[in-house]
Image: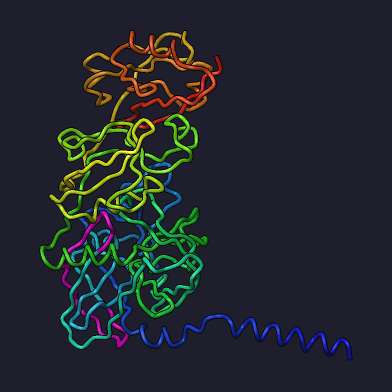
Amino acid sequence: MKIYGLLLLSLLFIQNAAAQLPDFTGMVRDNGKAVVNISTSQKAPENEVTSFPGEPQLPEGIPPELEELFKHFFQGPGGGMTPRETNSLGSGFIISGDGYVLTNHHVVKDADEIVVKLTDRRELVAKLIGSDSRTDVALLKIDAEDLPSVAIGSPEKLQVGEWVLAIGSPFGFEQSVTAGIVSAKGRSLPGGNYIPFIQTDVAINPGNSGGPLFNMEGKVVGINSQIYSRTGGFMGLSFAIPMDVVMNVVDQLKTKGSVSRGWLGVQIQDVTRELAESFGMKRPVGALIAKIIAQSPAEAADLQIGDIIVEFNGQKIETSGDLPPLVGMSPINEKSKLTVIRQGDKKVVKVKIGLLPEEDVQQSVTKAAPKPDNRLGISVSNLNEEQREQTQVLKNGVLVQNVGKGPAAQVGIQRGDVILRIANNVIRDVADFDRIVKNLPAGQSIAVLIQRRGSPVFLAIKLDK
Protein backbone atom coordinates (compact mmCIF):
# COMPACT_ATOMS: atom_id res chain seq x y z
CA MET A 1 0.00 0.00 0.00
CA LYS A 2 2.88 2.33 0.86
CA ILE A 3 4.60 1.56 -2.46
CA TYR A 4 1.32 2.17 -4.32
CA GLY A 5 1.03 5.59 -2.67
CA LEU A 6 4.57 6.55 -3.65
CA LEU A 7 3.95 5.51 -7.27
CA LEU A 8 0.75 7.55 -7.33
CA LEU A 9 2.56 10.64 -5.98
CA SER A 10 5.35 10.21 -8.56
CA LEU A 11 2.80 9.95 -11.37
CA LEU A 12 0.99 13.07 -10.18
CA PHE A 13 4.33 14.95 -9.97
CA ILE A 14 5.25 13.96 -13.53
CA GLN A 15 1.82 14.95 -14.84
CA ASN A 16 2.00 18.31 -13.05
CA ALA A 17 5.50 19.02 -14.42
CA ALA A 18 4.37 18.15 -17.94
CA ALA A 19 1.34 20.43 -17.60
CA GLN A 20 3.64 23.36 -16.84
CA LEU A 21 5.69 22.92 -20.04
CA PRO A 22 4.64 25.19 -22.93
CA ASP A 23 2.48 23.86 -25.74
CA PHE A 24 3.82 25.01 -29.11
CA THR A 25 1.27 23.25 -31.31
CA GLY A 26 -0.97 26.29 -31.85
CA MET A 27 2.00 28.54 -32.60
CA VAL A 28 3.35 26.13 -35.22
CA ARG A 29 -0.10 25.72 -36.77
CA ASP A 30 -0.61 29.50 -37.00
CA ASN A 31 2.87 30.43 -38.25
CA GLY A 32 4.34 27.42 -40.03
CA LYS A 33 2.87 28.35 -43.43
CA ALA A 34 4.75 31.68 -43.38
CA VAL A 35 8.15 29.94 -43.07
CA VAL A 36 9.78 29.12 -46.40
CA ASN A 37 12.66 27.13 -47.80
CA ILE A 38 15.26 29.06 -49.81
CA SER A 39 17.64 27.60 -52.38
CA THR A 40 20.14 29.45 -54.53
CA SER A 41 22.35 28.70 -57.50
CA GLN A 42 25.53 30.36 -58.62
CA LYS A 43 27.46 29.68 -61.81
CA ALA A 44 31.12 29.11 -61.08
CA PRO A 45 33.86 30.23 -63.51
CA GLU A 46 34.94 27.76 -66.18
CA ASN A 47 37.18 24.95 -64.82
CA GLU A 48 36.75 26.16 -61.23
CA VAL A 49 35.94 23.46 -58.69
CA THR A 50 33.74 24.61 -55.81
CA SER A 51 33.35 23.29 -52.27
CA PHE A 52 30.80 20.75 -51.08
CA PRO A 53 27.30 22.25 -50.98
CA GLY A 54 26.90 21.10 -47.38
CA GLU A 55 30.07 22.75 -46.10
CA PRO A 56 29.33 25.61 -43.64
CA GLN A 57 30.64 29.02 -44.68
CA LEU A 58 32.07 31.63 -42.30
CA PRO A 59 30.71 35.19 -41.92
CA GLU A 60 32.82 38.09 -43.08
CA GLY A 61 35.19 39.63 -40.52
CA ILE A 62 35.77 36.53 -38.34
CA PRO A 63 39.32 36.48 -36.90
CA PRO A 64 41.41 33.46 -38.03
CA GLU A 65 41.69 32.11 -34.48
CA LEU A 66 37.87 31.83 -34.28
CA GLU A 67 37.25 30.37 -37.73
CA GLU A 68 36.64 26.88 -36.32
CA LEU A 69 34.28 28.14 -33.64
CA PHE A 70 31.81 30.31 -35.57
CA LYS A 71 29.99 28.55 -38.37
CA HIS A 72 27.14 29.72 -40.54
CA PHE A 73 24.66 27.02 -41.18
CA PHE A 74 22.65 27.70 -44.29
CA GLN A 75 23.76 24.89 -46.58
CA GLY A 76 22.01 21.57 -46.70
CA PRO A 77 23.27 18.11 -47.55
CA GLY A 78 24.79 17.56 -50.93
CA GLY A 79 27.10 15.18 -52.68
CA GLY A 80 30.18 15.50 -54.75
CA MET A 81 31.99 18.47 -56.19
CA THR A 82 30.41 20.74 -58.79
CA PRO A 83 32.56 22.49 -61.37
CA ARG A 84 29.90 24.74 -62.94
CA GLU A 85 27.15 25.51 -60.42
CA THR A 86 26.79 25.72 -56.64
CA ASN A 87 23.58 25.33 -54.64
CA SER A 88 22.84 26.42 -51.10
CA LEU A 89 19.88 25.82 -48.87
CA GLY A 90 18.47 27.99 -46.12
CA SER A 91 15.31 29.27 -44.49
CA GLY A 92 13.27 32.45 -44.60
CA PHE A 93 9.88 33.84 -43.64
CA ILE A 94 7.17 35.99 -45.22
CA ILE A 95 6.66 39.37 -43.54
CA SER A 96 3.80 40.68 -45.70
CA GLY A 97 1.02 39.15 -47.76
CA ASP A 98 2.26 40.79 -50.96
CA GLY A 99 5.42 38.66 -51.03
CA TYR A 100 8.23 40.26 -49.04
CA VAL A 101 10.51 37.59 -47.56
CA LEU A 102 13.34 37.89 -45.05
CA THR A 103 16.45 35.72 -44.80
CA ASN A 104 20.18 36.08 -44.10
CA HIS A 105 22.60 37.92 -46.37
CA HIS A 106 24.95 34.92 -46.36
CA VAL A 107 22.17 32.62 -47.60
CA VAL A 108 21.75 34.55 -50.86
CA LYS A 109 25.20 36.12 -51.22
CA ASP A 110 26.49 36.06 -54.83
CA ALA A 111 23.48 34.01 -55.98
CA ASP A 112 22.51 34.09 -59.65
CA GLU A 113 19.06 32.73 -58.88
CA ILE A 114 17.05 32.57 -55.64
CA VAL A 115 14.10 30.19 -55.36
CA VAL A 116 11.56 30.40 -52.54
CA LYS A 117 9.63 27.21 -51.82
CA LEU A 118 6.30 27.67 -50.04
CA THR A 119 4.58 25.11 -47.81
CA ASP A 120 1.98 24.49 -50.57
CA ARG A 121 4.91 23.21 -52.72
CA ARG A 122 4.98 26.22 -55.04
CA GLU A 123 8.49 27.28 -56.05
CA LEU A 124 8.87 30.95 -57.01
CA VAL A 125 11.92 32.80 -58.28
CA ALA A 126 12.63 35.71 -55.93
CA LYS A 127 13.95 39.17 -56.66
CA LEU A 128 16.65 40.46 -54.31
CA ILE A 129 15.44 43.87 -53.11
CA GLY A 130 18.59 44.46 -51.10
CA SER A 131 21.11 42.83 -48.83
CA ASP A 132 23.27 44.09 -45.96
CA SER A 133 26.43 42.19 -45.01
CA ARG A 134 27.02 44.06 -41.74
CA THR A 135 23.76 42.89 -40.19
CA ASP A 136 23.49 39.72 -42.32
CA VAL A 137 19.97 40.62 -43.49
CA ALA A 138 18.51 40.17 -46.99
CA LEU A 139 15.09 41.25 -48.27
CA LEU A 140 13.48 39.28 -51.12
CA LYS A 141 10.26 39.73 -53.12
CA ILE A 142 8.21 37.00 -54.75
CA ASP A 143 5.36 37.52 -57.19
CA ALA A 144 2.37 36.32 -55.18
CA GLU A 145 -0.58 37.70 -53.24
CA ASP A 146 -2.58 36.89 -50.11
CA LEU A 147 0.32 34.98 -48.60
CA PRO A 148 0.41 33.92 -44.94
CA SER A 149 2.78 36.19 -42.99
CA VAL A 150 4.29 36.47 -39.53
CA ALA A 151 3.70 39.14 -36.90
CA ILE A 152 6.73 41.12 -35.73
CA GLY A 153 7.44 41.17 -31.98
CA SER A 154 9.59 43.30 -29.68
CA PRO A 155 13.05 41.91 -28.82
CA GLU A 156 13.33 44.63 -26.16
CA LYS A 157 10.54 42.97 -24.15
CA LEU A 158 12.15 39.54 -24.49
CA GLN A 159 13.50 38.26 -21.17
CA VAL A 160 16.36 35.90 -20.39
CA GLY A 161 14.87 32.52 -19.50
CA GLU A 162 11.82 33.00 -21.72
CA TRP A 163 10.77 30.18 -24.05
CA VAL A 164 11.37 30.70 -27.80
CA LEU A 165 10.73 28.60 -30.90
CA ALA A 166 12.50 28.20 -34.26
CA ILE A 167 11.05 26.88 -37.51
CA GLY A 168 13.32 26.16 -40.48
CA SER A 169 14.90 23.62 -42.82
CA PRO A 170 17.94 22.10 -41.08
CA PHE A 171 19.82 19.86 -43.53
CA GLY A 172 16.91 20.39 -45.93
CA PHE A 173 14.26 18.91 -43.62
CA GLU A 174 11.51 21.48 -44.17
CA GLN A 175 9.21 22.77 -41.40
CA SER A 176 11.39 21.42 -38.60
CA VAL A 177 10.50 22.88 -35.19
CA THR A 178 12.88 23.28 -32.25
CA ALA A 179 12.41 25.10 -28.94
CA GLY A 180 14.50 26.40 -26.06
CA ILE A 181 15.02 29.46 -23.91
CA VAL A 182 16.72 32.82 -24.25
CA SER A 183 20.20 32.38 -22.77
CA ALA A 184 21.33 36.03 -22.99
CA LYS A 185 20.64 39.31 -24.77
CA GLY A 186 22.93 41.91 -26.31
CA ARG A 187 25.72 39.49 -27.19
CA SER A 188 28.55 40.99 -29.25
CA LEU A 189 30.20 38.56 -31.69
CA PRO A 190 33.25 38.86 -34.00
CA GLY A 191 32.20 40.44 -37.29
CA GLY A 192 28.88 41.59 -35.82
CA ASN A 193 29.63 44.95 -34.25
CA TYR A 194 26.24 46.44 -35.16
CA ILE A 195 24.16 43.54 -33.83
CA PRO A 196 23.22 42.96 -30.17
CA PHE A 197 22.56 39.24 -30.74
CA ILE A 198 19.92 37.20 -28.91
CA GLN A 199 21.59 34.05 -27.57
CA THR A 200 19.44 30.93 -27.16
CA ASP A 201 19.82 27.19 -26.62
CA VAL A 202 17.36 26.42 -29.43
CA ALA A 203 18.73 23.59 -31.60
CA ILE A 204 19.95 25.26 -34.81
CA ASN A 205 21.79 23.46 -37.61
CA PRO A 206 22.85 24.01 -41.26
CA GLY A 207 19.72 25.05 -43.14
CA ASN A 208 18.08 26.88 -40.21
CA SER A 209 19.92 30.06 -41.13
CA GLY A 210 17.54 32.86 -42.11
CA GLY A 211 14.58 31.30 -40.31
CA PRO A 212 12.42 33.01 -37.66
CA LEU A 213 12.74 32.93 -33.89
CA PHE A 214 9.30 33.22 -32.22
CA ASN A 215 8.38 34.35 -28.72
CA MET A 216 5.50 32.75 -26.80
CA GLU A 217 3.05 35.24 -28.29
CA GLY A 218 3.75 33.76 -31.72
CA LYS A 219 5.61 36.87 -32.89
CA VAL A 220 9.01 36.90 -34.57
CA VAL A 221 11.69 38.46 -32.37
CA GLY A 222 14.77 37.49 -34.38
CA ILE A 223 16.38 35.86 -37.42
CA ASN A 224 18.48 32.79 -36.66
CA SER A 225 21.92 33.63 -38.00
CA GLN A 226 24.89 31.97 -36.30
CA ILE A 227 25.96 29.14 -34.04
CA TYR A 228 28.99 28.71 -31.82
CA SER A 229 30.45 25.31 -32.58
CA ARG A 230 33.66 23.30 -32.62
CA THR A 231 32.13 20.76 -35.00
CA GLY A 232 29.97 22.81 -37.38
CA GLY A 233 26.83 21.37 -35.76
CA PHE A 234 24.65 22.48 -32.84
CA MET A 235 26.38 22.62 -29.43
CA GLY A 236 23.82 24.58 -27.40
CA LEU A 237 24.74 28.14 -28.43
CA SER A 238 22.66 29.83 -31.13
CA PHE A 239 22.44 33.50 -32.06
CA ALA A 240 19.62 35.49 -33.64
CA ILE A 241 19.52 39.03 -35.05
CA PRO A 242 16.93 41.11 -33.11
CA MET A 243 13.95 42.21 -35.19
CA ASP A 244 14.26 45.90 -34.27
CA VAL A 245 17.67 45.86 -35.99
CA VAL A 246 16.23 43.83 -38.88
CA MET A 247 13.22 46.08 -39.51
CA ASN A 248 15.43 49.19 -39.52
CA VAL A 249 17.41 47.52 -42.33
CA VAL A 250 14.21 46.43 -44.12
CA ASP A 251 12.82 49.96 -44.17
CA GLN A 252 16.05 51.28 -45.73
CA LEU A 253 16.29 48.45 -48.27
CA LYS A 254 12.69 49.06 -49.35
CA THR A 255 13.11 52.80 -49.78
CA LYS A 256 16.62 53.08 -51.26
CA GLY A 257 18.02 49.56 -51.76
CA SER A 258 20.95 50.08 -49.39
CA VAL A 259 21.65 50.71 -45.70
CA SER A 260 23.17 53.81 -44.10
CA ARG A 261 24.57 53.71 -40.57
CA GLY A 262 25.61 56.24 -38.02
CA TRP A 263 29.33 56.69 -37.42
CA LEU A 264 31.19 58.09 -34.44
CA GLY A 265 34.74 57.49 -35.64
CA VAL A 266 36.34 55.84 -32.60
CA GLN A 267 37.92 52.51 -31.81
CA ILE A 268 36.81 51.21 -28.45
CA GLN A 269 37.46 48.41 -25.97
CA ASP A 270 36.05 47.03 -22.73
CA VAL A 271 37.13 48.43 -19.39
CA THR A 272 38.79 45.72 -17.28
CA ARG A 273 39.01 45.77 -13.49
CA GLU A 274 42.65 46.90 -13.69
CA LEU A 275 41.86 49.62 -16.24
CA ALA A 276 38.95 50.82 -14.10
CA GLU A 277 41.36 51.19 -11.19
CA SER A 278 43.87 53.07 -13.35
CA PHE A 279 41.14 55.52 -14.44
CA GLY A 280 39.87 56.04 -10.90
CA MET A 281 36.56 54.19 -11.47
CA LYS A 282 34.69 52.24 -8.80
CA ARG A 283 33.80 49.41 -11.19
CA PRO A 284 34.48 48.38 -14.82
CA VAL A 285 31.84 49.95 -17.07
CA GLY A 286 31.53 51.68 -20.45
CA ALA A 287 33.41 51.79 -23.75
CA LEU A 288 37.01 53.03 -23.56
CA ILE A 289 38.16 55.15 -26.53
CA ALA A 290 41.50 53.79 -27.72
CA LYS A 291 41.66 55.71 -31.01
CA ILE A 292 39.96 58.67 -32.65
CA ILE A 293 39.86 58.39 -36.44
CA ALA A 294 41.03 61.39 -38.45
CA GLN A 295 38.32 63.58 -40.02
CA SER A 296 35.60 61.76 -38.07
CA PRO A 297 32.66 63.11 -36.02
CA ALA A 298 34.58 62.20 -32.85
CA GLU A 299 37.56 64.30 -33.91
CA ALA A 300 35.28 67.26 -34.69
CA ALA A 301 33.70 66.96 -31.23
CA ASP A 302 35.30 67.24 -27.81
CA LEU A 303 36.10 63.52 -27.47
CA GLN A 304 39.56 62.38 -26.40
CA ILE A 305 41.58 59.17 -26.30
CA GLY A 306 41.11 57.71 -22.83
CA ASP A 307 37.51 58.92 -22.49
CA ILE A 308 35.14 56.21 -21.27
CA ILE A 309 31.65 56.44 -22.79
CA VAL A 310 29.09 55.40 -20.16
CA GLU A 311 25.89 56.76 -21.75
CA PHE A 312 24.69 57.35 -25.31
CA ASN A 313 21.54 59.46 -25.68
CA GLY A 314 20.51 58.46 -22.16
CA GLN A 315 21.09 54.73 -22.65
CA LYS A 316 23.67 53.17 -20.36
CA ILE A 317 26.78 51.60 -21.90
CA GLU A 318 27.81 48.69 -19.69
CA THR A 319 30.30 47.15 -22.14
CA SER A 320 31.94 48.28 -25.37
CA GLY A 321 29.57 45.99 -27.33
CA ASP A 322 26.58 48.10 -26.26
CA LEU A 323 27.77 51.19 -28.17
CA PRO A 324 28.05 50.26 -31.90
CA PRO A 325 24.39 49.18 -32.36
CA LEU A 326 23.17 52.43 -30.80
CA VAL A 327 25.46 54.57 -32.94
CA GLY A 328 24.65 52.58 -36.08
CA MET A 329 20.91 53.15 -35.70
CA SER A 330 21.28 56.87 -34.94
CA PRO A 331 20.07 59.40 -37.55
CA ILE A 332 22.81 60.78 -39.79
CA ASN A 333 23.79 64.45 -39.30
CA GLU A 334 21.86 64.73 -36.02
CA LYS A 335 23.52 65.46 -32.67
CA SER A 336 23.80 62.77 -30.02
CA LYS A 337 24.61 63.30 -26.34
CA LEU A 338 27.40 61.22 -24.83
CA THR A 339 28.28 61.00 -21.15
CA VAL A 340 31.97 60.20 -20.68
CA ILE A 341 34.31 59.71 -17.77
CA ARG A 342 37.48 61.75 -18.29
CA GLN A 343 40.25 61.51 -15.70
CA GLY A 344 37.74 60.53 -13.03
CA ASP A 345 35.13 63.21 -13.81
CA LYS A 346 31.85 62.90 -15.74
CA LYS A 347 31.45 65.11 -18.78
CA VAL A 348 28.69 65.51 -21.40
CA VAL A 349 29.84 65.70 -25.03
CA LYS A 350 27.59 66.39 -28.03
CA VAL A 351 28.57 64.74 -31.32
CA LYS A 352 27.07 65.17 -34.78
CA ILE A 353 26.72 61.59 -36.04
CA GLY A 354 28.28 60.96 -39.46
CA LEU A 355 27.74 58.36 -42.20
CA LEU A 356 29.66 55.12 -41.70
CA PRO A 357 32.27 54.80 -44.50
CA GLU A 358 33.43 51.60 -46.13
CA GLU A 359 35.73 49.57 -43.89
CA ASP A 360 39.44 49.95 -44.45
CA VAL A 361 41.85 47.04 -44.45
CA GLN A 362 44.38 47.54 -41.67
CA GLN A 363 47.74 45.82 -41.47
CA SER A 364 51.18 46.40 -39.98
CA VAL A 365 54.65 44.93 -39.68
CA THR A 366 57.20 44.82 -36.84
CA LYS A 367 60.97 44.79 -36.28
CA ALA A 368 63.45 43.98 -33.42
CA ALA A 369 66.67 44.71 -31.37
CA PRO A 370 68.24 45.56 -27.93
CA LYS A 371 67.81 44.21 -24.38
CA PRO A 372 65.24 45.57 -21.92
CA ASP A 373 66.71 48.01 -19.39
CA ASN A 374 63.81 49.77 -17.64
CA ARG A 375 61.09 49.18 -15.02
CA LEU A 376 58.64 47.78 -17.60
CA GLY A 377 61.12 45.16 -18.83
CA ILE A 378 61.12 46.31 -22.47
CA SER A 379 63.39 48.14 -24.87
CA VAL A 380 62.00 50.75 -27.26
CA SER A 381 63.14 52.92 -30.15
CA ASN A 382 61.90 55.90 -32.12
CA LEU A 383 60.02 55.10 -35.31
CA ASN A 384 61.49 55.89 -38.72
CA GLU A 385 59.33 56.76 -41.74
CA GLU A 386 59.14 53.16 -42.96
CA GLN A 387 58.12 51.89 -39.53
CA ARG A 388 55.45 54.60 -39.23
CA GLU A 389 53.99 53.53 -42.55
CA GLN A 390 54.04 49.87 -41.53
CA THR A 391 52.48 50.46 -38.10
CA GLN A 392 50.08 53.19 -39.28
CA VAL A 393 51.29 55.54 -36.52
CA LEU A 394 51.82 58.91 -38.19
CA LYS A 395 53.17 60.80 -35.18
CA ASN A 396 54.37 60.21 -31.61
CA GLY A 397 54.90 56.75 -30.11
CA VAL A 398 57.86 54.42 -29.55
CA LEU A 399 58.36 50.96 -31.05
CA VAL A 400 58.81 47.99 -28.71
CA GLN A 401 61.98 46.26 -29.87
CA ASN A 402 62.37 43.57 -27.23
CA VAL A 403 60.34 42.21 -24.30
CA GLY A 404 62.00 40.60 -21.29
CA LYS A 405 60.69 39.44 -17.93
CA GLY A 406 58.68 42.13 -16.19
CA PRO A 407 55.32 43.92 -15.93
CA ALA A 408 55.02 44.57 -19.70
CA ALA A 409 55.38 40.87 -20.57
CA GLN A 410 52.86 39.93 -17.87
CA VAL A 411 50.10 42.00 -19.49
CA GLY A 412 50.91 40.84 -23.02
CA ILE A 413 52.94 43.68 -24.58
CA GLN A 414 54.76 42.26 -27.61
CA ARG A 415 57.71 43.12 -29.79
CA GLY A 416 56.43 45.34 -32.62
CA ASP A 417 53.78 47.08 -30.50
CA VAL A 418 53.83 50.88 -30.54
CA ILE A 419 53.40 52.57 -27.15
CA LEU A 420 51.36 55.76 -27.58
CA ARG A 421 50.47 56.80 -24.03
CA ILE A 422 51.39 55.93 -20.46
CA ALA A 423 49.25 57.15 -17.53
CA ASN A 424 47.51 59.56 -19.94
CA ASN A 425 50.86 61.08 -21.00
CA VAL A 426 51.51 61.21 -24.73
CA ILE A 427 54.76 59.41 -25.61
CA ARG A 428 56.44 61.47 -28.35
CA ASP A 429 59.84 59.72 -28.37
CA VAL A 430 62.24 57.56 -26.35
CA ALA A 431 63.20 60.48 -24.10
CA ASP A 432 59.54 60.94 -23.13
CA PHE A 433 59.19 57.21 -22.53
CA ASP A 434 62.25 57.00 -20.27
CA ARG A 435 61.25 60.06 -18.23
CA ILE A 436 57.65 58.96 -17.70
CA VAL A 437 58.47 55.32 -16.91
CA LYS A 438 61.11 56.42 -14.37
CA ASN A 439 58.53 58.45 -12.42
CA LEU A 440 55.63 55.96 -12.47
CA PRO A 441 54.25 55.12 -8.99
CA ALA A 442 54.60 51.57 -7.71
CA GLY A 443 51.74 49.41 -6.47
CA GLN A 444 48.91 50.86 -8.58
CA SER A 445 47.46 50.13 -12.02
CA ILE A 446 48.74 52.32 -14.86
CA ALA A 447 46.89 52.62 -18.20
CA VAL A 448 49.13 52.08 -21.23
CA LEU A 449 47.84 52.69 -24.77
CA ILE A 450 49.52 50.60 -27.47
CA GLN A 451 48.87 50.05 -31.16
CA ARG A 452 49.12 46.52 -32.57
CA ARG A 453 48.43 45.46 -36.16
CA GLY A 454 46.76 48.77 -36.87
CA SER A 455 44.43 48.67 -33.85
CA PRO A 456 44.87 50.58 -30.56
CA VAL A 457 44.23 48.91 -27.21
CA PHE A 458 44.58 49.95 -23.57
CA LEU A 459 46.41 47.67 -21.12
CA ALA A 460 46.78 48.05 -17.34
CA ILE A 461 50.26 47.59 -15.91
CA LYS A 462 51.16 47.47 -12.22
CA LEU A 463 54.77 48.13 -11.19
CA ASP A 464 56.16 46.37 -8.10
CA LYS A 465 59.06 48.80 -7.62
Which residue shows up at 41% across the image and 71% down it?
170
Rendered location of residue 289, percent (x, y) = 32, 36
Rendered location of residue 427, percent (x, y) = 32, 17
- Quadrant of residue 339 within the rendered picture: top left
- Quadrant of residue 254 within the rendered picture: bottom left
Which residue shows up at 13% across the image and 50% down it?
333
Residue 292 covered by magenta stretch? no
- Quadrant of residue 451 within the rendered picture: top left
Left or right: where 50 falls relative to 297: right
Residue 135 covered by magenta stretch? yes
Q: Which residues are magenta?
A: 117-137
Which residue shows up at 40% across the image and 25% down it?
448
In the rendered image, the vertical position of residue 94 relative to residue 298, given as above or below? below
Considering depth in this image, is 451 or 464 the residue closer to the camera? 464
Which residue shows up at 36% across the image and 77% down it?
219
Considering depth in this image, is 277 or 373 the residue closer to the camera? 277
Tell me the quarter of the image containing the C terminus. Answer: top right
Question: In this rendering, does residue 55 appear at all?
Answer: no
